[in-house]
C-alpha cells in the first residue's frame, strides 16, 4: 500500500478513478444486455443503480485506502453559521423546483386530459425501492462532493502533492472561477454516471450537480445539496411529472 501511494500521484489517481468508474459502468450495462439478450437498458435502471452503488462504495474505499485520494468527512458536519448561510438558499431553490413541477403538471393536464388520471401526489415507495431514496441521496452527495469533487478540485488547483487536510484547506480558499470549473467537471462526471437514463434525466442530473456543486464550494457541507437533490430527484414522480416525461399511456 505504501509503495502504491508513492508511485501514483494524486492527479493520476483521480484520472484512474474516473476512467475505471465509467468503464465499469459501461461494462455492467453490456453484461446485463448479454444476460437479458436485449440492447434495451430500461430494466437495467432498476438493477443498475444498485450494482453501480456497490461499485462506487468499493472504489471509494479502495482509492481512499490505496491512493492519495481521500474522503472529506468534515462535509458531514456543519456549524450553525454554515447552515444559516446554506439552508435558506437551498430551501428557496427546492421550493422553486417544486413550484416549476406543479406548473408543468397543470400545463400538461390542460393540454391532454388523460394526464389527469395520474394522482396529483403519491409517494410510490414500491417503485425502484424509493423508500431507500433519502439514504441514497446522502450517500450520493457525500460521494460526489466530499470524495469526487474535492479530489478533482485539489488536482486542478495544483495541491495534489500536499497532505489531504492541507490540500483541502488550500482548495477551500480558491477563487470563484476555479470553484466553478471544479463543479462543472464533477457535474459532467455525474451526468455520465446516469447514462442508463433518458437524456432529460441525465440533463437534470447535470444541472443538479452543477448547482449543488457551486453551493458546496461555498459552504463545504452536503446538507443543502441533499435537500435540493431530494426536491429534484424524489418529487417529480410524487407529482406525476416523471410519469408524463416517461410516456404515460394515452390509450
Image: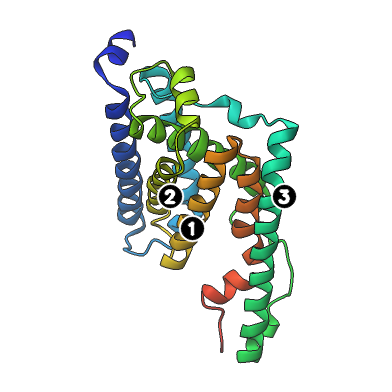
| Residue behind mark 2 | 187
Q: Quadrant of the N terminus?
A: top left
Q: Is residue 180 above or below residue 117?
A: above
| Residue behind mark 1 | 207
Residue 96's x, y, as percent? 66, 64
Residue 159's x, y, as percent? 36, 24
Give the residue displayed 30% in from the left and 52% down from the top.
Answer: 30
Residue 151 in sight here: yes
Q: Which mark is residue 221?
A: none
Task: Choose the circle earlier in sequence order: 1 or 2.
Answer: 2
| Residue behind mark 3 | 88
Q: Quadrant of the C terminus?
A: bottom right
Q: Quadrant of residue 197?
A: bottom left
Q: Nearer the viewer, mark 3 or mark 1?
A: 3
Verify CB contact (< 8 Å) between mark 1 and mark 2: yes
Between the C-alphas of marks 1 and 2, the distance is 7 Å
Residue 112 in sight here: no
Residue 199's x, y, as percent? 41, 66
Task: Choose the circle earlier in sequence order: 3 or 1.
Answer: 3
Q: Secondary structure at mark 3?
A: helix
Answer few, some or many: residues within 10 Å of disc 1's Cα (few below 14, many 20 plus, some between 14 and 19): some
Answer few, some or many: residues within 10 Å of disc 3's Cα (few below 14, many 20 plus, some between 14 and 19): few
Residue 90's x, y, as percent? 66, 51
Answer few, some or many: residues within 10 Å of disc 2's Cα (few below 14, many 20 plus, some between 14 and 19): many
Give the residue displayed 74% in from the left and 69% down from the top.
Answer: 121
Amino acid at each position: 500500500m505504501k509503495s502504491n501511494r508513492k508511485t501514483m500521484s494524486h492527479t493520476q489517481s483521480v484520472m484512474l478513478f474516473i476512467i475505471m468508474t465509467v468503464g465499469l459502468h459501461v461494462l455492467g450495462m453490456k453484461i446485463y444486455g448479454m444476460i437479458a439478450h436485449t440492447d434495451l437498458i430500461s430494466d437495467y435502471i432498476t438493477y443498475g443503480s444498485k450494482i453501480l452503488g456497490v461499485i462506487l462504495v468499493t472504489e471509494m474505499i479502495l482509492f481512499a485506502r490505496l491512493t492519495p485520494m481521500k474522503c472529506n468527512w468534515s462535509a458531514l458536519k456543519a456549524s450553525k453559521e454554515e447552515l444559516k448561510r446554506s439552508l435558506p438558499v437551498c430551501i428557496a431553490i427546492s421550493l422553486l423546483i417544486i413550484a416549476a413541477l406543479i406548473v408543468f403538471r397543470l400545463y400538461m393536464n390542460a393540454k391532454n386530459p388523460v394526464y389527469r388520471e395520474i394522482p396529483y401526489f403519491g409517494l410510490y415507495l414500491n417503485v425502484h425501492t424509493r423508500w431507500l431514496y433519502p439514504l441514497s441521496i446522502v450517500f450520493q452527495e457525500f460521494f460526489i462532493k466530499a470524495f469526487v469533487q474535492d479530489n478533482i478540485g485539489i488536482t486542478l488547483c495544483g495541491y495534489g502533492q500536499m497532505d489531504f487536510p492541507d490540500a483541502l484547506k488550500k482548495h477551500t480558499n480558491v477563487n470563484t472561477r476555479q470553484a466553478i470549473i471544479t463543479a462543472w467537471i464533477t457535474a459532467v462526471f455525474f451526468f455520465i454516471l446516469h447514462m442508463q437514463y433518458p437524456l432529460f434525466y441525465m440533463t437534470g442530473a447535470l444541472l443538479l450537480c452543477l448547482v449543488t456543486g457551486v453551493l458546496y464550494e461555498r459552504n463545504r457541507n452536503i446538507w443543502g445539496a441533499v435537500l435540493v437533490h431530494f426536491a429534484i430527484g424524489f418529487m417529480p414522480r410524487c407529482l406525476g411529472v416523471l410519469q408524463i416525461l416517461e410516456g404515460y399511456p394515452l390509450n
